[in-house]
Amino acid sequence: MVKVSLEYKGDLRCEARHEPSSSTLNTDAPVDIQGKGEAFSPTDLVGTALGTCMATTMAMSGKRHQVPDIAGLRIDVTKEMTSEGPRKIRRLSTEMWIPLPKSADPEGVLEHAALNCPVYLSLDPGIEKPFTVHWQKEQN
Protein backbone atom coordinates (compact mmCIF):
# COMPACT_ATOMS: atom_id res chain seq x y z
CA MET A 1 0.00 0.00 0.00
CA VAL A 2 1.27 3.47 -0.91
CA LYS A 3 -0.12 6.72 0.42
CA VAL A 4 -0.18 9.95 -1.59
CA SER A 5 -1.23 13.08 0.31
CA LEU A 6 -2.33 16.20 -1.46
CA GLU A 7 -3.26 19.73 -0.71
CA TYR A 8 -5.40 22.06 -2.79
CA LYS A 9 -3.33 25.24 -3.15
CA GLY A 10 -5.97 27.47 -4.77
CA ASP A 11 -6.29 28.70 -8.35
CA LEU A 12 -7.12 25.13 -9.51
CA ARG A 13 -3.71 23.85 -8.40
CA CYS A 14 -2.77 20.96 -6.13
CA GLU A 15 0.44 19.66 -4.64
CA ALA A 16 0.75 15.90 -4.20
CA ARG A 17 3.30 14.23 -1.93
CA HIS A 18 4.38 10.62 -2.37
CA GLU A 19 4.71 9.50 1.25
CA PRO A 20 7.36 6.76 0.84
CA SER A 21 9.84 9.05 -0.97
CA SER A 22 8.62 12.54 0.00
CA SER A 23 8.69 13.45 -3.72
CA THR A 24 6.18 16.09 -4.70
CA LEU A 25 4.47 17.12 -7.90
CA ASN A 26 2.07 19.89 -8.76
CA THR A 27 -1.02 19.85 -10.92
CA ASP A 28 -2.90 22.64 -12.66
CA ALA A 29 -6.16 22.62 -14.54
CA PRO A 30 -5.92 22.87 -18.33
CA VAL A 31 -6.35 26.27 -19.98
CA ASP A 32 -9.58 25.18 -21.70
CA ILE A 33 -11.28 24.75 -18.33
CA GLN A 34 -10.05 27.89 -16.53
CA GLY A 35 -6.62 26.67 -15.43
CA LYS A 36 -3.29 28.15 -16.37
CA GLY A 37 -1.91 24.90 -17.82
CA GLU A 38 1.41 25.46 -16.02
CA ALA A 39 1.75 21.86 -14.78
CA PHE A 40 0.39 18.42 -15.50
CA SER A 41 -3.39 18.22 -15.24
CA PRO A 42 -4.82 15.29 -13.30
CA THR A 43 -5.82 13.59 -16.56
CA ASP A 44 -2.33 14.26 -18.01
CA LEU A 45 -1.04 12.17 -15.13
CA VAL A 46 -3.18 9.25 -16.32
CA GLY A 47 -1.35 9.35 -19.67
CA THR A 48 1.95 9.76 -17.84
CA ALA A 49 1.12 6.78 -15.65
CA LEU A 50 0.31 4.69 -18.72
CA GLY A 51 3.58 5.46 -20.50
CA THR A 52 5.81 5.06 -17.47
CA CYS A 53 4.04 1.87 -16.43
CA MET A 54 4.53 0.40 -19.91
CA ALA A 55 8.23 1.29 -19.90
CA THR A 56 8.83 -0.07 -16.41
CA THR A 57 6.90 -3.29 -17.04
CA MET A 58 8.69 -3.81 -20.36
CA ALA A 59 12.09 -3.36 -18.69
CA MET A 60 11.24 -5.83 -15.91
CA SER A 61 9.84 -8.41 -18.30
CA GLY A 62 12.70 -7.96 -20.76
CA LYS A 63 15.24 -8.52 -18.00
CA ARG A 64 13.42 -11.68 -16.86
CA HIS A 65 13.42 -13.06 -20.42
CA GLN A 66 16.99 -12.04 -21.32
CA VAL A 67 15.88 -9.42 -23.86
CA PRO A 68 18.62 -6.78 -24.27
CA ASP A 69 18.32 -3.59 -22.21
CA ILE A 70 15.77 -1.08 -23.54
CA ALA A 71 17.52 2.03 -22.18
CA GLY A 72 16.69 4.80 -24.64
CA LEU A 73 13.10 3.58 -25.15
CA ARG A 74 10.88 6.52 -26.08
CA ILE A 75 7.13 6.65 -25.57
CA ASP A 76 4.67 9.36 -26.56
CA VAL A 77 1.19 9.21 -25.04
CA THR A 78 -1.39 11.55 -26.54
CA LYS A 79 -4.48 12.19 -24.42
CA GLU A 80 -7.77 13.28 -25.94
CA MET A 81 -10.76 14.36 -23.86
CA THR A 82 -14.43 14.00 -24.73
CA SER A 83 -16.04 17.02 -26.36
CA GLU A 84 -19.60 16.13 -25.41
CA GLY A 85 -21.21 14.66 -22.34
CA PRO A 86 -19.28 14.32 -19.11
CA ARG A 87 -15.65 15.45 -19.36
CA LYS A 88 -13.45 12.38 -19.34
CA ILE A 89 -10.56 10.80 -21.20
CA ARG A 90 -11.75 9.52 -24.57
CA ARG A 91 -8.49 8.24 -26.04
CA LEU A 92 -4.90 7.54 -24.99
CA SER A 93 -2.78 6.91 -28.08
CA THR A 94 0.61 5.36 -27.38
CA GLU A 95 3.51 5.41 -29.80
CA MET A 96 6.83 3.90 -28.81
CA TRP A 97 10.29 3.63 -30.28
CA ILE A 98 12.17 0.56 -29.06
CA PRO A 99 15.96 0.91 -29.44
CA LEU A 100 16.33 -2.71 -30.52
CA PRO A 101 15.59 -4.60 -33.73
CA LYS A 102 12.47 -6.75 -33.52
CA SER A 103 14.72 -9.83 -33.83
CA ALA A 104 16.05 -9.07 -30.31
CA ASP A 105 12.60 -10.00 -28.95
CA PRO A 106 11.39 -12.93 -31.09
CA GLU A 107 8.77 -14.00 -28.54
CA GLY A 108 7.17 -10.53 -28.33
CA VAL A 109 7.89 -10.18 -24.62
CA LEU A 110 8.18 -6.38 -24.72
CA GLU A 111 4.93 -5.63 -26.53
CA HIS A 112 3.07 -8.18 -24.41
CA ALA A 113 4.42 -6.54 -21.24
CA ALA A 114 3.39 -3.06 -22.42
CA LEU A 115 -0.19 -4.16 -23.10
CA ASN A 116 -0.41 -5.96 -19.76
CA CYS A 117 1.03 -3.32 -17.47
CA PRO A 118 -1.14 -2.57 -14.42
CA VAL A 119 -2.20 0.90 -15.60
CA TYR A 120 -3.24 -0.34 -19.06
CA LEU A 121 -5.28 -3.11 -17.45
CA SER A 122 -6.86 -0.67 -14.98
CA LEU A 123 -8.11 1.82 -17.56
CA ASP A 124 -11.82 1.99 -18.28
CA PRO A 125 -12.65 -0.21 -21.29
CA GLY A 126 -14.44 2.80 -22.83
CA ILE A 127 -11.11 4.59 -23.33
CA GLU A 128 -9.67 3.97 -26.80
CA LYS A 129 -6.05 2.80 -26.52
CA PRO A 130 -4.37 2.60 -29.92
CA PHE A 131 -0.80 1.35 -29.71
CA THR A 132 2.00 1.72 -32.29
CA VAL A 133 5.53 0.32 -31.99
CA HIS A 134 8.59 1.31 -34.02
CA TRP A 135 11.55 -1.04 -33.81
CA GLN A 136 15.12 -0.10 -34.64
CA LYS A 137 16.14 -1.17 -38.14
CA GLU A 138 18.15 -4.39 -38.40
CA GLN A 139 21.93 -3.88 -38.72
CA ASN A 140 23.40 -5.56 -41.80
Image (spheres, rainbow, N blue to C red):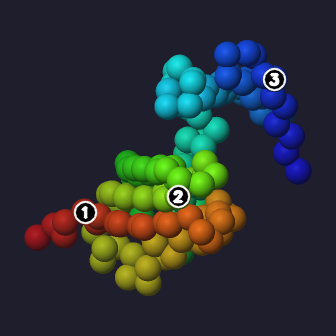
Q: Is residue 56 visible?
A: no
Can you tell which mark lies on residue 7?
Answer: 3
Q: Residue at x 85, y 45 (%)?
A: 2
Circle 2 SS class: strand
Judging by the rendered image, the residue that carries numbered circle 1 is 136
Q: Residue at x 52, y 58 (%)?
A: 90
Q: Is residue 73 left or right of residue 114?
A: left
Of label 1 and label 3, which has the lower sequence position?
Answer: 3
Q: Residue furthest left?
A: 140
Q: Residue at x 34, y 66 (%)?
A: 133
Name the amino acid type tagged 2: Arg
Q: Quadrant of residue 11?
A: top right
Q: Quadrant of residue 64?
A: bottom right
Pinpoint residue 111: horizontal percent, then vertical percent.
46, 72
Name the amino acid type tagged 3: Glu
Judging by the rendered image, the residue that carries numbered circle 2 is 90
Q: Which label lies toward us, 2 or 3?
A: 2
Q: What crowding class fits label 1: few (fewer than 14 Cα within 10 Å), some (14-19), or many (20 or more)?
A: few
Pinpoint residue 140: horizontal percent, then vertical percent.
11, 70
Identify whether 94 is placed above or below 46: below
Q: CA distance from mark 1 to mark 3?
A: 43 Å
Circle 3 SS class: strand
Name the amino acid type tagged 1: Gln
Residue closest to the eye, 82 or 130: 82
Identify whether 108 is placed above or below 75: below
Of label 2 and label 1, which has the lower sequence position?
Answer: 2
Q: Is residue 24 visible?
A: yes
Q: Residue furthest top?
A: 10
